[in-house]
Image (cartoon, helix red, strand yellow):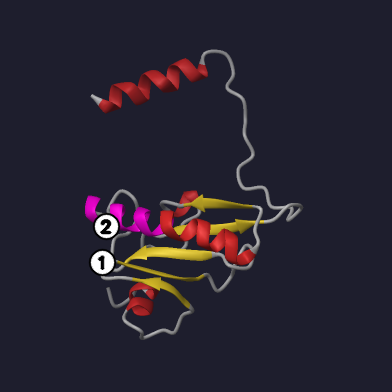
Amino acid sequence: MPDCIFCNIVSREIPSYTVYENDDVYAFLDIHPVNRGHTLVIPKRHARNVFDISSEDWAAVMKAVHALAGTIEKATGADGINLVMNNREHAGQVVDHAHMHIIPRFKGDGIRLMPGHAYKGDEAKEVLKKIRAALI
């Protein structure tokens, strides 16, 4: 995809700090990290998001994320790791190329990713019913 910044990174048209690479995935440091060591893992074949990525590429990305998460935690001295994927604009996706964030977390870093809200009344039962119906 010529307009895709991540495709241009994979093709080396745009420089990056490469963390890991194989035939299917490319991992590099985020240039605007949440914390030091924040890494993006992407499929080399263009896919817009989780809804667009092939099963094979998804598996390759997850395999790389699994291998890299512990390595990044150890290398940065982090106290934990967040794995995050934003899908579509209103979920916070900025670059339309599927990517997983590996974000090292440190005690007291002050970052709060997802404030929760309790279900009210029968909301949980209602949403569960809708999800289960969509599975069939």
* Magenta region, residue range: 55-65
Asked if residue 1 lies left or right of residue 32, the reply is left
Check residue 13 for magenta coloring.
no
Using the image, determine if residue 96 lies above or below residue 115: below
Residue beneath the point at 48% across and 49% down: 91
Q: Which of marks 1 and 2 is nearer the N terminus?
A: 1
Q: Which of marks 1 and 2 is in front?
A: 2
Q: Helix or strand or loop: what does disc 2 sit on? A: helix
Asked if residue 43 lies left or right of residue 18, the reply is left
What's the CA distance linking mark 1 and mark 2?
A: 8 Å
Q: Name the residue under label 1.
A: 45
Using the image, determine if residue 80 lies above or below residue 94: above
Residue beneath the point at 46% across and 57% down: 93
> Where does the image place residue 120, in percent across and percent down from the top left?
59, 18
> Where does the image place residue 54, in percent across and percent down from the top left?
23, 53
Q: Magenta region's main secondary structure?
A: helix
Q: Nearer the viewer, residue 134 or 23?
A: 23
Marker disc for residue 57:
2
Marker disc for residue 112:
none
